[in-house]
Image (cartoon, rainbow, N blue to C red):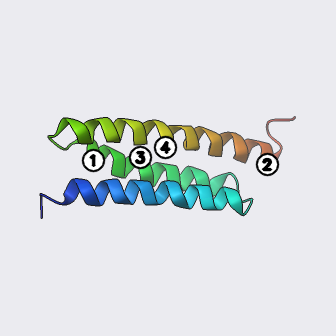
Amino acid sequence: MDKYKPYLFGFASALIICLILFSVSINLYGFPHIVLALIGLYFTAKLFSSKRIIWKAISTLLFLIHLYFLLFGIFGFMILTGYYFN
């Protein structure tokens, strides 16, 4: 099972990116992005603990994508609640 853990964590992280993009397509901004990005960061951290260098490179890329969506979700939540414009 340890042999397939990087595949599972990578697939879960990529699936969460697809869920975030789906939530953008149905105009659901803010809080769902924050939650999904935090879950994605967890799976990416698990993927980074792999021994092979290719998984570390993939997890670094996924980490940056999830971090972008996390910041996007925070700013989207601030705009939706009116905090950003007051």
Dividing the picture into quadrants, the one containing residue 5 is bottom left
**Are the residues flagged by discs 4 and 3 in contact, CB closer than 8 Å?**
yes
Q: Residue furthest front?
A: 54
**Are the residues flagged by discs 1 and 4 in contact, CB closer than 8 Å?**
no
Q: Residues within 10 Å of mark 4 (few under 14, many from 20)?
A: many
Dot 2 corresponds to which residue?
Answer: 81
Q: Earlier in the sequence, mark 1 or mark 3?
A: 3
At x 43% / y 55%, what residue is drawn? 14
8 lies left or right of 32: left
Dot 1 corresponds to which residue?
Answer: 47
Dividing the picture into quadrants, the one containing residue 31 is bottom right
**Are the residues flagged by discs 2 and 1 in contact, CB closer than 8 Å?**
no
Question: Where 65 falls versus 26 (above or below)?
Answer: above
Marks 1/4: CA–CA distance: 13 Å
- The percent position of residue 86, horizontal first and vertical second, equals 87, 34
The mark closer to the camera, 4 or 2, is 4
Q: Label 1 amino acid?
A: Leu
**Are the residues flagged by discs 1 and 3 in contact, CB closer than 8 Å?**
no
The mark closer to the camera, 2 or 1, is 1
At x 55% / y 38%, what residue is drawn? 68
**Are the residues flagged by discs 4 and 2 in contact, CB closer than 8 Å?**
no
Q: Secondary structure at mark 1?
A: helix
Q: Label 3 amino acid?
A: Leu
Q: What label does residue 67 carry, if any?
A: none
Marks 2/1: CA–CA distance: 34 Å
Q: Label 4 amino acid?
A: His
Dot 3 corresponds to which residue?
Answer: 41
Dot 4 corresponds to which residue?
Answer: 66
At x 50% / y 49%, what residue is drawn? 37
